[in-house]
Amino acid sequence: MTKDAKARYVIEEDGGRPILRLSGKWSVGSGFPSPARIARELAAAAKKEKFAVIDLDGVTSFDSTLPAFLVRLREEWRAGELKTVSGAEKVDALERLAEAGRRNAANRDKPQASRSLVERLGQASITLWREHIEVCEFCGRTFTELCRLAVGRSSMRAGDFFHVLRTVTVQALPIVSLISLLVGFIIAFLGAVVLRRFGAEFAVSYLVGYGMLREMGAVMAGVIMAGRTGAGFAAEIGSMKVNEEIDALETFSIPSFGFIVLPRVLALAIALPLLTIYANVVGILGGYLVADFMMGVPRSIFFSEMIRVIGIADLLLGVTKGFVFGLLIAFAGCLRGLQCGGGAQAVGVAATRAVVLGITLIIIFNALIDYIAATLNI
């Protein structure tokens, strides 16, 4: 038995079965005995017995170091089973938590290559299933908040909504203008190379009109906003989660989705169709400049030919894509922000994952919308 220490233990025998009785104060600075030494003493007392008991009745106070000590003791004593009896309700939950944390840490530190194929497939399946549950929960809670907003019961503040709307529209115009203008240049340059071979320079207006209105305007605006705004949403919400601001909102019974997610979803759903129209105008202007100064296509011919072949359906298709892309970007940014772990590094990871998910969803849904449009002959 240890002497002159706040944390004490004694090993007794009851019918040949060893009993480890702990007493005193078991916390940081209490002079814990070595788990390995106690395991050896238990093994010596157990002799052929494969079962030992831990009695915690004498423990007057403890902190998280006691469950950690018990976990280490179980690892060291390999002779058989260690069972906690009297006073177990005091530390059982903490001990299970310490054991789970130890297993998780061991799994994280275990090299991926050293895991079996079955283990890796199982872990990937569990991760995929959890991701599916989180996505369904996110969509359900967002839809619920939209319904609450429709009946005037949402916790969303108008000031937050207009602040986000201003951020994703006015402040995004410079980069959208630059990229859209360059995309218009590129489409017209492509037409200049090909159409000159057939003496059909006037047809560059078809290429620019179709390319910008149906595809490039919405896609490029979406990609820009995924990299600019989607990452920003993830970083903002991730920082709020790291600083426990979201927990504070829930503590005060303020629905975090209505306060944080809903303004961002609505703002992007409104902003991206408008940015798509703006990108179309700038891109067509860029295509016209190339057609006029490089190919000698007069302004009257360029715009009259464009209006003759493109219609309102092409414009609406691009605007519809912008609306869908806005929802997808907001979804990716807010979801990854809410999934953010602890620490500054986790915020950066969340922002990166938001950009990757946003751009991936844009490409997938763009192909899906184009397929539907081709099927319906739009």
Image (cartoon, rainbow, N blue to C red):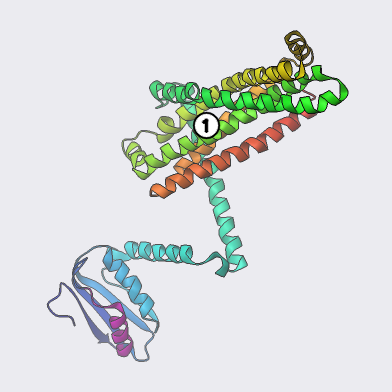
Judge from the rendering whether residue 64 lies leftward or rightward of residue 326; answer left or right. Answer: left
Judge from the rendering whether residue 76 lies leftward or rightward of residue 303; answer left or right. Answer: left
Judge from the rendering whether residue 17 lies leftward or rightward of residue 293; answer left or right. Answer: left
Disc 1 marks which residue?
Answer: 143
Amino acid identity at mark 1: Phe
Residue sitting at the far right: 198
Q: Is residue 248 above or below residue 374?
A: below
**Residue 115, can we see it?**
no
Residue 210 among magenta residues: no
**Residue 87, can we see it?**
yes
Residue sitting at the far bottom: 47
Coordinates of residue 375 in the picture (x, y in percent): 79, 29
Residue 34 among magenta residues: yes
Coordinates of residue 337 in the picture (x, y in percent): 46, 41
Viewer-closest of 309 and 317? 309
Q: Quadrant of residue 7?
A: bottom left
Viewer-closest of 148 and 333? 333
**Residue at x 50% of width, y 40% of height:** 335
**Residue at x 77% of width, y 25% of height:** 191
Boundaries of the magenta span: 32-45
**Residue at x 37% of width, y 64% of height:** 96
Coordinates of residue 113 in the picture (x, y in percent): 57, 67
Quarter of the picture containing the N terminus is bottom left
Judge from the rendering whether residue 306 lies leftward or rightward of residue 151; answer left or right. Answer: right
Coordinates of residue 331 in the picture (x, y in percent): 53, 36
Viewer-closest of 370 and 223? 223
What's the magenta bit mostly, secondary-structure-wise? Answer: helix
